[in-house]
Each structure stands twice: as C-alpha cells, then as structure tokens.
Amino acid sequence: MGRVFNFSAGPGALPQEVLEQVREELLDWHGAGMSVMEMSHRGKAFVGIAERAEQDLRRLMNIPDNYRVLFLQGGATGQFSAVPMNLLGDHDRADYIQTGSWSKKAIAEAGKYCQVNVAAEGGKDQPMSIPPQDQWQTDSQAAYLHYTPNETISGVEFHWVPESGDVPLVADMSSTILSRPVDVSKFGVIYAGAQKNIGPAGLTIVIVREDLLDRASAHTPSVFNYKVQAEADSMSNTPPTFAWYVAGLVFQWILERGGLEAMAERNRAKADKLYGFIDQSGFYANPVARDCRSWMNVPFVLADDGLDKAFLEGAEEAGLATLKGHRSVGGMRASIYNALGEDAIDALVDYMKSFEARHG
Ligand SMILES: *Cc1c(COP(=O)(O)O)cnc(C)c1O
C-alpha cells in the first residue's frame, strides 16, 4: 500500500515533501557524513539548523523581538505545569477558561500549584459553544489567563483572541499553531506540542514575552525554567535535535507556500468543504456551534452508531486512515492539519457520500 490520507489527531500527518527531504538527508546531512540524529547539539552544523528553524518560525508567525522562542521537551502536558511554575510569581491564583478535555487537564495540573479560577466553562451542551467574553468571571489579581484556542478532541475552536488587559494571556496552541496568522503581541505565552502541526513528537515550542522571564518559582526544574532555557538557547540540556530539525523543514515548507496567510486560506477552504458536506447531509452530523467549529479537528457522528465499525473499515480500505473519534466521545474525527491538502478532503467526502448511498 502506498501513502494514505492520514487524519490522525496527533502525532499527525507531515508534508510528504518534508519526509522526502528527510529521507534524502538522512544518512549524510549536507556532506557532514552523518545524520542529524548523530550530531552534537553544540556543533556548528546543528546550531545552524537550530538557528535557522527559529528564524523561520519568527518570520512565519511574525514574532516580535521582545519574545523568546524555546524548543523544549515534555509536551504540552509538561507546559501545564511549567506555566504556573514560571508565571505565578507573587500571585497565588490564575484564571482558566474551560472549553473541553485539554483545558480540563491544564486546570487539573495547575491546581497543584495555585488556586485555579475557572472563569468560564463551555463545550458542554450541544451544540458545543464558547461563552462570550462578557460572561467570563475573570479575576484582576490572577497571575495569567489561560485558554485552549483549539480543543483537539471536541473540535471547538476560538476564532477570536480574548482580551486580557494587563493579565498575561497564555494559550495552549498545540493543535492550531501555524494554521493561520496570529497576533503574537497579544499573548504572554504561547505553547504547543509539535506533533500536530509542527513536526515529530518530542518537541514543544514555547513563545514567551521577555518581561515574564523573571517570575519562576525557586523549585522550577531548570529544563522547564523559561529563563534558564532562554539564556541557554534551549540547550540547558540536550534538546530534541531531530524533531527540531524536522520542524525547521516544516517551517520552510510553509514559507515556500506563502506562509500563514496561505495556510489560513487553504485551511478555511478545507474546513468549509467538509462542514458544508456534513451539514447538507441528513446522515452525518457535527456537534459544534457554527461560530466555533475547528478548522483542524472535525468530529462527526453517523445517524446510526451501529455503522461506525463498517464506516471505519471501509475508510481504511479507501486509504483514509485514523478517522476514529477520541475514545471519550466516540464517532469519527477527521484531523485536517496543514499537511493535508484539499485532495484529502475530496477523498473523504467522496467516501462519505458513497457510504451514505449504501447505508443511508
Ligand atoms: C495533543 C494536545 C495536548 C497534549 O500534548 P502532549 O504533547 O501529548 O503533552 C495538549 N493540548 C492540546 C490542545 C493538544 O491538542
């Protein structure tokens, strides 16, 4: 079997061109006579790869000079702890917006370090929605305001950025980063596990505003300490070198295709096509309010869940992989990250049509 369309929520599909370049460079990176995996992270070759990746990410996201970009480990889940450890400072509380499973996990973890105020809760009733900001019960004494711009499991996405005033805004962008332009200057911290829209698992990107680097509590592990890692260019210990390199290739891939404006256009068209098909069908349904449907993760259910198994088996046969919904919600989920083109949506919609014709 050749390559399939991979709708996995994470680790997710990578651009084929990037994988081909990795293969090309795998045994002998640019005449170094070795693979990037085998290089010292402090050698000239890898430092060059690392710097280029950071510059390209800065260009892509238009990251202002007063922000540091960190290439860490520990995943987004590690950041659930690192955020309170680094940002609480003299504060004893933080605000969180709960819109689904990942924000719930972030809240549970933060509760180990401080008093958590859940300032708003959404994503519960059907259709799932996000409470408007004028209903949020935020606390002006909060160390920061944390939210999850895209809930990967339920497919609930903010299409706006909250206003947090003087309170630093913190975002877990794991499954939406690089899907569209974002005004980084509105945020105190942006973090993301790489394995959705950036590169291989094992790398975690943190973008942190410089004035927030002095607030870490004394017991923060140095590998999670933003200031320590910023001063060490993310090399206070051995970084995830290979994942960093592949992420750099993905950044170049996006730049070559017109950057985040072009990605946004492409992602909007992909999402519109898939939701449009689901909405006109009486057989498939999406459980999310229209104004907060995710561009990246599209959950849907069949009219009869007794057909789920047949749907998934037929999909596999048609070269459409990993469409099973998260175990906590059931049904299906199509994750349509940057690496999936409109051809993947066309193939999926064709299959859904033919399945409906046979079973509807
Ligand atoms: C996948 C995901 C996580 C967890 O990421 P890890 O890197 O596995 O820790 C957290 N938040 C969101 C929004 C995610 O999509």
Image (tube, rainbow, N blue to C red):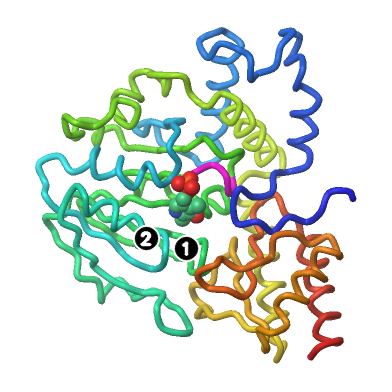
Residue 182 visible from this viewpoint? no
Q: Nearer the viewer, residue 305 or 118?
A: 305
Q: Main secondary structure of the magenta part?
A: loop
What's the CA distance linking mark 1 and mark 2? Answer: 8 Å
**Crowd class of label 1 (few under 14; some 14 to 19; many from 20; radius 10 Å):** many
Residue 15 is situated, as x and y percent measured from the top left of the image, at 73, 43
Query: In percent of the image, x 61 and y 48: which residue is there?
Result: 11
Circle 2 residue: 103
- In this picture, which residue range is highlighted in magenta? 193-197
Circle 1 residue: 151
Is 172 displayed left or right of 311 in the figure? left
Residue type, label 2: Ser
Is 42 displayed left or right of 78 in the figure? right
Residue at mark 2: C-beta within 8 A of ligand 1: no
Query: In percent of the image, x 83 and y 49: which residue is there?
Result: 3
Residue type, label 1: Glu
Residue at mark 1: C-beta within 8 A of ligand 1: yes
Please identify the quadrant where the C terminus is shown: bottom right
Residue 18 is situated, as x and y percent measured from the top left of the image, at 74, 36
| SS of the residue under disc 2 | helix
Is 28 displayed left or right of 59 in the figure? right
Q: Of marks 1 and 2, which one's residue comes earlier in the chain? A: 2
